[in-house]
Amino acid sequence: DVKVTQSSRYLVKRTGEKVFLECVQDMDHENMFWYRQDPGLGLRLIYFSYDVKMKEKGDIPEGYSVSREKKERFSLILESASTNQTSMYLCASKSPVGSGNTIYFGEGSWLTVV
Amino acid sequence: GQQLNQSPQSMFIQEGEDVSMNCTSSSIFNTWLWYKQDPGEGPVLLIALYKAGELTSNGRLTAQFGITRKDSFLNISASIPSDVGIYFCAGLPRGSGGSNYKLTFGKGTLLTVNP
């Protein structure tokens, strides 16, 4: 089974703090994603990465950056957290087209910015 | 980004009843995925569909990839209390490169099962 692990399940941070959300997958997938999920808005793509050191902006990249130094690890960075970034953050990885073309999610990270 | 039209938004049913939900899109998809999300948890993959017309089962769950490639449905038979949760559809488009990576989601169907 594919395992996508998010290192922090619950975080409380202060406005202006730098926040790191870490995600690791164990299936050697090239494609990884960060989403945020908010009531009434559904899942929105923040950034995705299709290879080591390669990244592309999703639909709502403002206020976020990402890092993909190793294939298995994709980090989401909030340079200066703000209260409107309070949300559930979901990491995902995608199997290749020839191996199922399926996306697997982590357990989620609940971030509260106060 | 684009959204899928998922319906119904919520359902309240009695234990033992069958449930049906569907998603439609104006775009063609190459892959349809169905997920279940429990409160406070990440979405868990239930069924993946890769071919137009494909009908796939996973226990009491059955899903179909619409023949037009623009819709999919999920059925749950003989519902039980642990079926409670939010069910999402998601589609991956045709195309290569960046466009193939972008999953489009429905807004979810909230299922409540009364024991």
Image (tube, coloured by chain):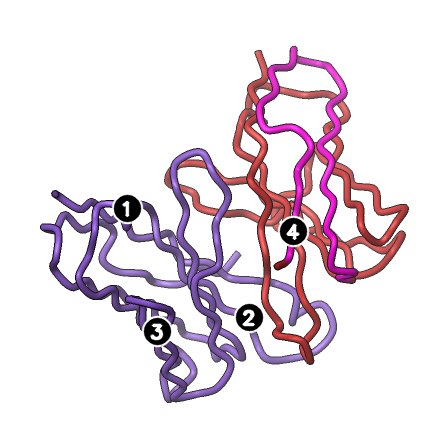
| 1 or 2: tag closer to the N-terminus | 1
| Chain identifier of the purple chain | B
Instruction: Please give the label number shown on residue A3.
Output: 4
Q: Are marks 1 and 2 in contact (CB under 8 Å)?
A: no
Q: Is residue B34 magenta?
A: no
Q: Nearer the viewer, residue A10 or B97?
A: A10
| Chain identifier of the red chain | A
Q: Tell me the subunit letter for badge 3.
A: B
Indicate the quadrant containing the N terminus of chain A: top left, top right, bottom left or bottom right: bottom right
Label 3 to label 2, Cα distance in Å? 16 Å
Count residues near mark 4 (Cα–Cα under 10 Å), then give few for <14, some for 14-19, many for 20+: some
- At x 66%, y 37%, the residue is A6
| Nearer mark to the viewer, of 4 and 2 | 4
The residue that label 2 is drawn on is B92
Q: Position of residue A25 (x, y in %)?
A: 72, 50
- At x 51%, y 81%, the residue is B50
